[in-house]
Image (cartoon, rainbow, N blue to C red):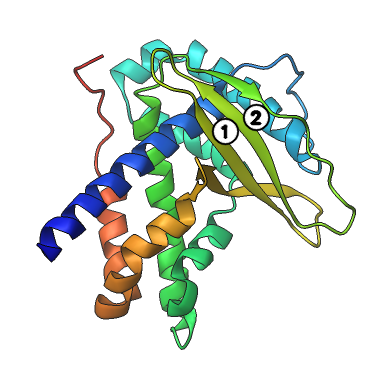
Amino acid sequence: MIAKLRSRHMLKTNNLFKVWFLTAVAFLMSAQAFAAESIDRTQPYQMMTQVAEVAFERLKSEQDNIHQDPELLKVIVEEELMPYVNAQYAALKLLGPNLKGADRKDVGVFIDSFRKYLVSSYAQVLTQYTDQTIEFGPEPKIKADSRITSIKVDIIDTPRPNIKLEFKLRKDKKSGEWKAFDMVAEGISLLSSKQSEWNTKIRQEGILQVADELEKLAAQPIRFESNK
């Protein structure tokens, strides 16, 4: 009975994770009326909308090449999206209490593997993008000393129900630049969810074992699903 409950929980978590990635892509790929030649990373709201414009235009212009070689999506994710994602901070938050007493080199390996996993996951989700639309919440008012902010959006994917999302961003003390590190969907944090899923495995098998599994997942080829 316990095994069945765990299995159902894992399935639900994985489905939510897939939805979060897809809706995140919908956010990042929604074309906005901003000039994107120079993206100011010190203004998080404008940054996210401008990143969307650049990435969307590239996806649109390279569709033929992408369908011939889906691995190109990893390149697009790496070049257009990852510069605005704080993968290191997200990985450290995922490790949470497992950081205590952990070998620094092992942590570095995990961060690198987690980043590759993110790139591959986003690239795979891009194969499912079908022009979902988005409604932005108001631009947040950010205090001068604040290092965390959020951008609220509604993902519209008719005929499915709208999905309420909140992107969490963190400001770097030295540079003043913002990067995304978490997504909250319908009140549930992506990082908290994955931490709950991986925490026991990391504790029992070690950071390097989980990092190795992430490496294998990241190395899987990108494929277009046949149900489009």
Q: Which residue is mark 1?
A: 80
Residue sitting farthest toward the front: 1
Graded by Cα atoms within 10 Å as few (under 14), some (14 to 19) or many (20 or more), the crowding at tag 1 reads some
- Number of numbered markers: 2
Q: Taking 111 as reference, is 140 left or right? A: right
Q: Are marks 1 and 2 in contact (CB under 8 Å)?
A: yes
Could one spot residue 211 in this view of the protein?
no
Q: Amino acid at mark 1?
A: Glu
In x, y percent, where is residue 115? 45, 53
Vertically, is 148 above or below 21? Answer: below
Determine the residue positioned at 52% across, 65% down: 93
Nearer the N terminus, badge 1 or badge 2?
2
Q: Taking 96 as reference, is 218 left or right? A: left
Q: Taking 4 as reference, is 176 left or right? A: right
Determine the residue positioned at 25% across, 79% down: 204
Vertically, is 149 above or below 114? Answer: above
In x, y percent, where is residue 147? 77, 57
Whole-number angstrom distance, CA of label 1 to CA of label 2: 7 Å
Determine the residue positioned at 75% across, 23% down: 37
Quarter residue 45 falls in: top right
Q: SS for tag 2?
A: helix
Quarter residue 12 falls in: top left
**Front residue of this view, candidates 87 and 142:** 142
Q: Which residue is mark 2?
A: 51
Q: Amino acid at mark 2?
A: Val
Q: Taking 218 as reference, is 42 left or right? A: right
Could one spot residue 3 in this view of the protein?
yes
In x, y percent, where is residue 209? 26, 71
